[in-house]
Image: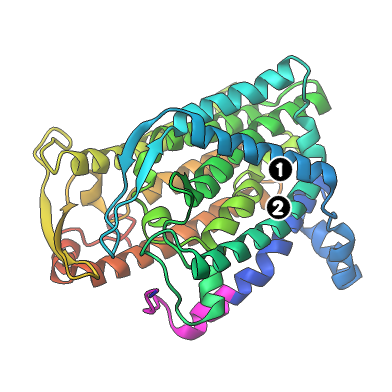
Amino acid sequence: MVENKLVHSPLITYGSMLTLLSFTPPFVILMWYTNVHADGSILKTFNHLRENGLQGLIDIWPKPTAIAGKLIICYALFEAALQLLLPGKTVEGPISPTGHRPVYKANGMAAYAVTLITYISLWWFGIFNPAIVYDHLGEILSTLIFGSLVFCVLLYIKGHVAPSSTDSGSSGNIIVDFYWGMELYPRIGKHFDIKVFTNCRFGMMSWAVLAVTYCIKQHEEYGRVSDSMLVNTILMLVYVTKFFWWEAGYWNTMDIAHDRAGFYICWGCLVWVPSIYTSPGMYLVKQPVNLGLQLALYILVAGLLCIYINYDCDRQRQEFRRTNGKCTVWGKTPSKIVAAYTTTSGEKKTSLLLTSGWWGLARHFHYVPEILAAFFWSVPALFNHFIPYFYVIFLIILLLDRAKRDDDRCKAKYGKYWKLYCEKVPYRVIPGIY
C-alpha cells in the first residue's frame, strides 16, 4: 500500500494536487508564448488574456504537429537506446521500505557526452539545424503536454496490472494515485528503468540540449552570441554536467528513492523541466543583454563557485555513505549518528546520519548553493523583465517543500534518532535562519 500520511492538511494536499494538474499545462504554454512572442513581458501576455479571455489562451496554444512528434520520438528513442546499450558500472540504489534494492547501470555521463557531441556535430556538418527545435518549440511543448499525460495514465494502469516490484500499491484514491504514482521503481523488462529515463535521460538531458539550441538560435538571429547568453549557457551546461557526473548519487535522493512514478515526477521531468528550467535561456534568445566582460566574469565565477559547493555537498555525503563513515570530512573524522529503523517487512536496519562538514551547517544546506546557482544563470538577463526569475522563485518553493517532506519522512523513519539529529543540526536549510 501507498503511505497515506500527508505532510500537509488534506485540504492543502488535494487542493495543491488539483491546482497543479489543472494549471501547469497552460502555464507551460504561457511561459513559451511570453518568452518567444511577447518580448518576455508578462504584462503583454496578461493584457492579451484579459482582452480575449479563455479564447485568448486557446488562440496562442499551438496544436501538436507531426514534426514536433517526430522530433520528440527521435530524441526519446535515441536516449532510450543510449540508456540500454552504453556500457556502465553496476550500481545499487538504497534499500526501499519493503527491503527491495534496485540495481542500475551508471552510464549517464557517457550518454550525456554522446548526446551533446551528436547534436552539435549534426549542426556543425549541416545535417540538422537545431534552430528548427526553437522554431517549433511551442508545438513540441504542446505535444509533450498531451503525450506525457497519456504516458502518466499508462503508468497508472501499469501500476495496477503489472507492477515491477513490491514497492507499489494504491492509496485507494484515483487522484492521489495518478498524481503521486503507483510504483516506486517501474521498469520495462528487467533493465529499462522508467524513472531514470524520464528524470535523467529525457528531462535533464533536454535541459542541456535546449541550452545549446537557444545559443545556436540566437547566433542565427543576430549573427553572434551575447555574453549574457554565453554565461547562462555555460553555467547551465556545467550544472547538468555535474548532475550526470553524480547521477548514481541522484538515485539515492527523494526523486528516485521516495517519490513514486506519477504526474508529479514523470510529467514534471518530461514537460516542466524542458520548458521552465530552461526558461532564462529561452528569454535571452530574443532579448539579448550586453553585460560587458567584467560583469559577465563576476557572474560566471560566482555561479561556478555555487555549482561546485552544491557538488561538494553531494560528494561529501556520498563518500561518507560509501566508506560507511570511515573517511575524513574537511580534514577531520566525521561526526555521525547511527540511526536504527525497521522496514515495512519488519527487518531491522541501520543508517549513518552525517552531522559535520556541509551537513553540520544545516540538514539541507546543499539547497542554498543550488538556488544561488539558478540565480546566477538567470541574472545575465538583468532586470528588464521578471520572467527570467520565475525558475528561481519556483526552485525556492520546490526545495523548501522538499526539505519539509524529507524531514517529515525521516522523522517517521528514524524516530528518536532523528530528534537527536535535529538537536545536533538544528537548521533545516539556511544556517542560523531556517
List the residue tagged with mark 2. Answer: 144
Can the viewer see residue 59 in this picture? yes
Say which residue appears at 56% left-offset and 67% top-offset. 156
Q: Amino acid at mark 2?
A: Leu
39 horizontally vs 95: left or right: right
Q: Is residue 12 magenta?
A: yes
| Quarter residue 308 falls in | top left
Write down the region rendered in magenta. Answer: 2-17
Q: Nearer the viewer, residue 198 or 249?
A: 198
Q: Position of residue 118 (x, y in %)?
A: 63, 23
Disc 1 + disc 2, Cβ < 8 Å: yes
Q: Is residue 425 magenta?
A: no
Q: Position of residue 232 (x, y in %)?
A: 60, 34
Q: Which mark is residue 72?
A: 1
Give the distance between the C-alpha atoms of the residues marked 1 and 2, in whole angstroms. Answer: 8 Å
Q: Quadrant of the N terminus?
A: bottom left
Q: Amino acid at mark 1?
A: Ile
29 horizontally vs 407: left or right: right
Instruction: Describe the element under mark 2 as helix, strand or loop.
Output: helix
Instruction: Describe the element under mark 1 as helix, strand or loop.
Output: helix
Say which residue appears at 52% left-offset and 39% top-offset. 376
Instruction: Looking at the image, tell me whether mark 1 or mark 2 is earlier in sequence order.
Output: 1
The answer to whether 186 is drawn above or below residue 325 in the figure is: below
Tell me the crowding category of disc 1: few under 14, some 14 to 19, or many 20 or more residues within 10 angstroms, Cα based. Answer: some
Q: Position of residue 199 (x, y in %)?
A: 51, 48
